[in-house]
Amino acid sequence: PSLPELNVIVQANNPDLINGTGDDNTLGDFAMTSYYWSSSEYADDTGLVERPSDGLRSGGSKQISYVVRCARR
């Protein structure tokens, strides 16, 4: 998913995160402290990854394994 779609997935499954009262460790099988790939690119050899627990975004090397979530439009 794109970064906005990834955020919708997280917020739709745990709306308490928006007001700071949610569990920031797990969301079903969604590990909130792991980095997730987005479909957005940072550079030719890096993509954007995001950690749902704090919204931290970073460029992730395409040679490193990160978690992936599917999104359907």
Image (cartoon, helix red, strand yellow):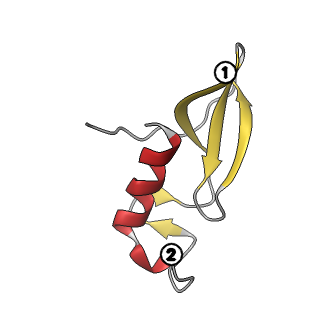
**Mark 1 nearby-residue class (10 Å; few <14, some 14–19, many ≥20):** some
- Front residue of 22 and 4: 4
Tell me residue 29's x, y (percent): 41, 58
Compared with 66, 35 (above or below) is: below
Tell me residue 57's x, y (percent): 69, 47
**Residue linked to disc 1:** 62
**Residue farthest top in this picture:** 44
- Front residue of 32 and 44: 44
Left or right: 34, with 23 as reference point? right
**Residue linked to disc 2:** 18
Residue at the spot x=40%, y=75% of the render?
Answer: 15
Residue at the spot x=48%, y=54% of the render?
Answer: 7
- Front residue of 5 and 31: 5
**Quadrant the C terminus occupies:** top left
Which numbered dot is residue 54?
Answer: none
Foreground mark, 2 or 1, reads 2
Amino acid at the residue labelled 2: Ile
Choose top left, top right, bottom left or bottom right for residue 71: top left
Q: How many marks?
A: 2
Residue at the spot x=62%, y=47% of the render?
Answer: 50
